[in-house]
Amino acid sequence: MHTKRLVLAGGGHVHLPVLARLDAFAAAGITVVCIAPGPYLAYSGMGPGLLAGRYALAELRFPIAAMAARPGAEFVRGTVAAIDPAGRRLRLADGREIAYDAVSFGLGSRVVPDFPGNDRPGPVVYTAKPIENLLLARQAIESRVEAGGTVRVMVAGGGAAGFELAAGVLGLFDRLGVKTPSLTVAAPRGLLPGWPDRAGRLAEASLTRRGATICAARVVGLAGRGAALSDGTTRPCDFVLAATGTRPPDLFAAAGLSAEADGGLMVTARLQSPFHPEIFGGGDCIHFGPAPLPRAGVYAVRQGPVLAANLLAFLAGRELLPFRDTGKNYLALLNCGDGRAILRKGPFVAEGTWAMTLKDWIDRRFMRSFPLRP
Ligand SMILES: Cc1cc2nc3c(=O)[nH]c(=O)nc-3n(C[C@H](O)[C@H](O)[C@H](O)COP(=O)(O)OP(=O)(O)OC[C@H]3O[C@@H](n4cnc5c(N)ncnc54)[C@H](O)[C@@H]3O)c2cc1C
């Protein structure tokens, strides 16, 4: 009997339920190959706490390579560079080719700063993704403080990720005993645009009472030892943390699998490509055809079980399920970096230490829900 091969391109949050069900795939005679650049996936929900020094990296990593170390499955360390839909194969950055009977993309998204880089010595830029960058930023700040130097940080972006990074830096400053924190947030549309007004006000108060400055301008470039803003000013800074929005990888548009300007993998309600039925995907890297979804992990988490069921059903010749859980009224919790969190559920907004206790409990429960399966 020909063993069918399912390739998981990327070990994102959306693929965790597939990795947790490898026994079911093996029982159906399906070999699963998971391709990812490294053996771990960092859980973004705890990323800002990593920056603040609340969590160690080991507390927020899923061991995806170990999860894939099962009979009938394989972990391939590599980066997918191109898709050949007609030939049903992927090309990796190192030139290797991997054939598939079905493929599922969980490649996530990347932060591409909307300002040019610096070709002279100047501020070091860390993007909010991959999450491991937040540990690098923390270590760079720690080293500077330990060496007795001043640290000036600019956060580019005032959305949920930008707020959490700014709050995390303030939490780190506090942990390190920095007396005069220097943190500017470039938030051209204010903090938490699109959220209820009260959330924006709470976020602003949380940052400014700890000494941060909020600028209604965006970073337009790096100028020597600072960041140039769209209001014509230049703010001195040593580090820039960029949370200027996320984009799917380019490879879908290059393969003709994207029908949208955002370049995401076009999928139907069944999380399946309308162009090639053996191509699936979920999470931040897709464009969900029936109703575009925000790039939030909550959708990756909701889509994961449907994706796992559909991949199994597709390869076994059974009927596929639609993904219907598209509601936007989900519980959102933002880590304020000082033991508090801002909670939003629909129009309801609140802040407190109890909200951070709840966030920590939910995040740790999520980590435990995918135990290492050696
Ligand atoms: C600081 C921060 C905090 C956040 N907090 C929250 C939160 O609290 N709640 C929430 O709902 N959302 C949150 N998000 C958004 C959340 O991170 C994403 O929506 C979620 O991670 C998307 O999951 P995914 O499965 O699509 O991809 P990801 O989980 O991002 O995983 C993608 C994987 O693909 C791999 N990969 C990428 N390119 C390639 C390639 N070419 N070849 C092979 N592998 C590749 C990556 O290494 C990674 O392992 C946050 C984002 C940030 C930046």
Image (cartoon, rainbow, N blue to C red):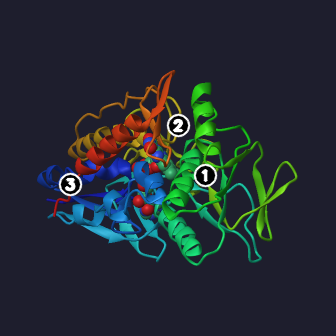
- The extreme right residue here reads 232
Single out the residue that lies furthest toward the top.
Answer: 347
Task: Mark yes or no: residue 87 visible.
Answer: no
The amino acid type found where label 3 is placed reads Pro
Q: Which mark is residue 371?
A: 3
Mark 2 vs mark 1, foreground winner is 1
Ranked by sequence position, the earlier of labels 2 and 1 is: 1
- Is the CB–ligand 1 distance for label 1 below 8 Å? yes
Q: Earlier in the sequence, mark 3 or mark 2?
A: 2
Q: Which mark is residue 243?
A: 1
Q: Amino acid at mark 2?
A: Pro
Q: Position of residue 213 (x, y in %)?
A: 71, 48
Q: Secondary structure at mark 2?
A: loop
Q: Is residue 132 left or right of residue 125?
A: left
Label 1 secondary element: loop
Nearer to me, 324 or 278: 324
Contact, mark 3 vs mark 2 (Cβ under 8 Å): no
Q: Nearer the viewer, mark 3 or mark 2?
A: 3
* Res 294 label: 2
